[in-house]
Image: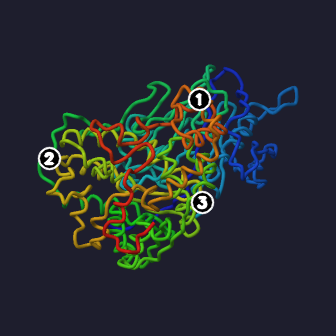
Amino acid sequence: LPILTFEITKMCGILAFFRQHGLGLLPPASAGQGDSEPSAKRARLPAVSLNGRSSTVTVETADGKQHLVQVMPGVKTQQYEKLINGEKSQAEAIKQRLSELVVRMRSRGPDGFGFYGSTNFGMAHCRLAIMDPAHGQQPLVRGAYVCVANGEIYNYRELQKEHDLPQAPTNSDCEVLVPLYEKFGAGGVCEKLNGIFAFVIASDDGTPCLAARDHCGIKPLYMGKSDDGHVWFASELKAIVDQGCQEYMEFPDGHYWTPATGLVKYYKPDWDDDQYVHSTEADRQSIYNSLCTAIRAQCMSDVPFGMLLSGGIDSAVLLAILKPIMDELGLPLMTFTVGMAGSPDVVAAKMLSEHFGTEHHWHEFGPEDAFAAIPEVIYHLETYEPELIRSAIPNFYLAKLAASKVKMVLTGEGSDELFAGYLYFRDCPDAGALHRELRRIFHHLHNVNNQRSDRMSMAHGLEARVPFLDPNFIDVVMRTHPALKMITKEHNNSEKYLLRKLFDGKLPDAVLWRTKAMQCEGIGMTWVQRLQAMCSAAVSDEEFQRCTRSYETNPPQSKEEFYYRRIFDQHFSGMEKFVHVWEGGCRAAGAAWKSAQYTRHGLANTSQLAQGLGHECRT
């Protein structure tokens, strides 16, 4: 398959507000939420200066910088009448409010801002311009409809040809969204898309038509509703947390929404059933071919890009397929690793880089770095879940390193949920239990792995793509009989044996059979314990005793957990329901079988992670 190039100009943050016709004005913002940022930044709302009826809004953010928010052509300026008392009209107020709020997500799209709206609605967008900054601005105003979208539609060219869609004014892949809606209606759009996305389409009179999120929640989306009929959509909770809504919700993955239907689940794969009858044979060639197709499709870019290289089997497989593609293009492959000197990830990634000849970059990481980053990590991650925060901290530094060199990376996220990669699967009793557990953790991707990958990369204006979560590849692997994924003596006592065997002879043995390490484990075998000690030292005994009585939802079970919760409450007080906390404090505790591999404090035996990596692996 050829490498396609296209305009990537909308990895971003999206924000949309719809006012119920004839009901109420824009609700006042609540005080004390959403406007606070990490202590390194001043905690106040951005100030906005409106240039009358001009096409831009000047936004001064909390760091003192000024940004121009572009008001898209076609805004109904005749509706900007001034009120008798001299206050701004409702349309002007909507423009001002959304211009303020979208800048809260400016790290998702630091290269530009856009707005479109009237007296009844507003749609705003902050843009990460990977190429061709002069085109592809959003909101997209197309005929009678307006669209804001975050993500990538990988099969957009095929859709244009297959459905004879009209020629688009730009080459942006999101140009297919409005034509598909016009041709097939709300129920005929999402199932046709192969990509990572969250989008909102409205008619230009301010009526919301369609909102949707991708099949497994790779891109985020939140929704808020007020009692008087106002509706909000936002890429991140921080943009709308204080906007007077009586109901907030994470928009569910694999769903779309219209005012008439409410939420509708469109992603319903046949394997997502406990009674599904799997193929008894392993079609290894189909698995390999499907992964190659997904990786090649996600290489669409006109700018240099790279990949995150942990040195585990998932990133190693990605590297083995990606390197020949980059050679074909005549481009160097940049790889990025984070970790303590001598850690399993650093040693294995160096081995792979030398084996394949990549341009390798490494950020040396330590427990003190981890502790210092916690406030900013929680602010961007929007959670207090301890296992997720521990994994997100090194991811935060890794994304910062990658963003200094490229604007897009491929990652190995999602493989463990397809191939049974976590160490607690060693204790899985049978194939049926394995498939049920894979379904359970797959359906948590949206607020665990995917939330970490998206928020930590976009905190630095970096786009992360996830080939293992291509819907076609997911189907091929999840239809494979779960007995072939069991960790058994016949399978070399290795997790993800099915995947490893596909690359036998194509990777160094030390990496091919390396023990699975989650990101918070592979970057250093002792740093988590040191981090936990620093968190505990920051919380007094009296504070911890009081906290156990004050939290009704997910009460902290340790000083570490309370330390995270306290920071979360500074930004998102009252929003604890959005945080997914694993039963028992870790992923493994929710399985149908007992396993001692993990506790709520992390991996029980970290020394096993150094197995086979030689004397260099020491921390």
All told, the count of numbered labels is: 3
Residue type at mark 2: give it: Ser
The x, y position of residue 347, in whole percent, is 41, 71
Q: Is residue 239 visible?
A: no
Q: Residue furthest front?
A: 541
Q: Quadrant of residue 365?
A: bottom right
Query: Residue 369 bears which disc, if any?
Result: 3
Q: In this rendering, which labeled residue sits more in front, label 3 or label 2?
A: 3
Please tell me which residue is depicted at 67% across the width and 20% down the height of the picture: 23
As drawn, is 175 to the left or to the right of 100?
left
Kind of residue at badge 1: Val
Give me the C-alpha separation between circle 3 and circle 2.
Answer: 47 Å
Horizontal and vertical percent position of residue 108: 59, 52
Front residue (pair 433, 24)? 433
Residue corresponding to mark 2: 279
Question: Tags 3 and 2 in contact by the CB under 8 Å rule?
Answer: no
Q: Residues within 10 Å of mark 3 (few under 14, many from 20)?
A: some
Q: Position of residue 185 (x, y in %)?
A: 42, 35
Residue that numbered label 1 is attached to: 231
| Image height of 134 relative to 15, above or below | below
Residue 307 appears at what percent x and percent y?
44, 66
Which of pointers 3 and 2 lies earlier in the amino acid sequence? 2
Q: Secondary structure at mark 2?
A: loop
Question: Split into 4 quadrants, where in the image is the C terminus?
Answer: bottom left
Q: Is residue 500 in view?
A: yes
Report the front residue among 480 and 566. Answer: 566
Secondary structure of the residue carrying tag 1 is: strand
For label 3, the SS is helix
Q: Amino acid at mark 3?
A: Asp
Q: Are marks 1 and 2 in contact (CB under 8 Å)?
A: no
Mark 1 or 2, closer to the camera? 2
